[in-house]
Amino acid sequence: MRAEIGIIGGSGLYDMAELVDRQDVTIETPFGEPSGPYVLGTLRGRAVAFLPRHGVGHRISPSELNFRANIYGMKTLGVTAILSASAVGSLKEEYRPLDIVIPDQFIDRTRGRVSTFFGRGLVAHIAFAHPICPVLAGIVAGAGEVAGAAVHRGGTYVCMEGPQFSTLAESVLYRSWGGDVIGMTNLQEAKLAREAEICYTTIAMVTDYDCWHPDHESVTADQIIQNLVKNAAAAKAVLREALKRVPREPRACECAHALRSALVTAPELVPDAVKRDLAPIVGKYMPAEAL
């Protein structure tokens, strides 16, 4: 079974009960195990692959996520667009708990996470100035407005390591940088999706004001969980509306050809094992005999 659109569910969004003809699919990847089985099915006439980012029962912390396996699995299923729902803290007064932000930029504050499929004898330098697919982001923002959500278009997502929340000094610093929301997961997904030539956008669901706000000096998991339940319902409404708007192939955005000028290593010099592992991603740019 194949899928067109991938949905990655973050904290609070662990299932898409609306999917019909559901089928759990376990995928083995060269990078290890994904967060769990992919749930394949149909929603609003589109073939969808759903993956709960943190696993069933929320068992995997942000620092433990196997981002490469998660995105590689989506690629092998045929996914060309990923809608990623995530819980975030707000760094601006106007982005209130239960609002949705569709960011278009990232700042990386993670440490030591693997964020590329490449290496081991195959070098690629992907363009990443604009890390979110503008077409997909516009579709999701429009869908959110139709669904009645309080949606904010654009902004910068600060991706921190976690699993601890920010110190007050860090929260104030990120605000001074112009950060809009803060989370722990989406940057690596965006990088790997771009390398895999998959359109990607974030649906950032605000749960709290982070600790910079005088009313949120001590952000707790309990406070966030209360808002996660409300956010999950809103996210599902946005996703349902967005699915019918996502364009089918051929795609007009640059995401579809992101590797075209990024691969540096001559195909004949790439180790055979790397060619086999990355065939779903680089196959169309290397001659058949090179694979």
Image (cartoon, rainbow, N blue to C red):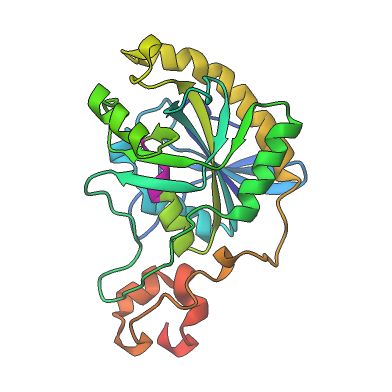
Locate residue 220: give its quadrant.
top left
Q: Which residues are magenta?
A: 184-188
84 sits to left or right of 211: right
Question: Quadrant where the N terminus lies?
Answer: bottom right
Q: Position of residue 159 (x, y in %)?
A: 36, 40
Residue 137 at least partly seen: yes
In depth, the one of 244 and 40 nearer the eye is 244
Residue at horizontal 43 percent and vertical 66 percent from the top: 127
Magenta highlight on residue 86: no
Q: Position of residue 263 (x, y in %)?
A: 40, 77
Residue at horizontal 46 percent and vertical 78 percent from the top: 261
Residue at horizontal 60 percent and vertical 58 percent from the top: 80
Q: Position of residue 262 (x, y in %)?
A: 42, 75
Residue 72 at least partly seen: no
Vertical position of residue 53 compared to residue 189: above or below: above
Vertical position of residue 197 compared to residue 100: above or below: below
> What count of labels does the image hold?
0
122 sits to left or right of 24: left
Q: Main secondary structure of the magenta part?
A: helix
Residue at horizontal 42 percent and vertical 25 percent from the top: 57
Vertical position of residue 219 compared to residue 205: above or below: above
Q: Residue furthest front?
A: 176
Locate residue 247: give its quadrant.
bottom right
269 sits to left or right of 81: left
Question: Quadrant where the C terminus lies?
Answer: bottom left
Locate residue 15: give its quadrant.
top right
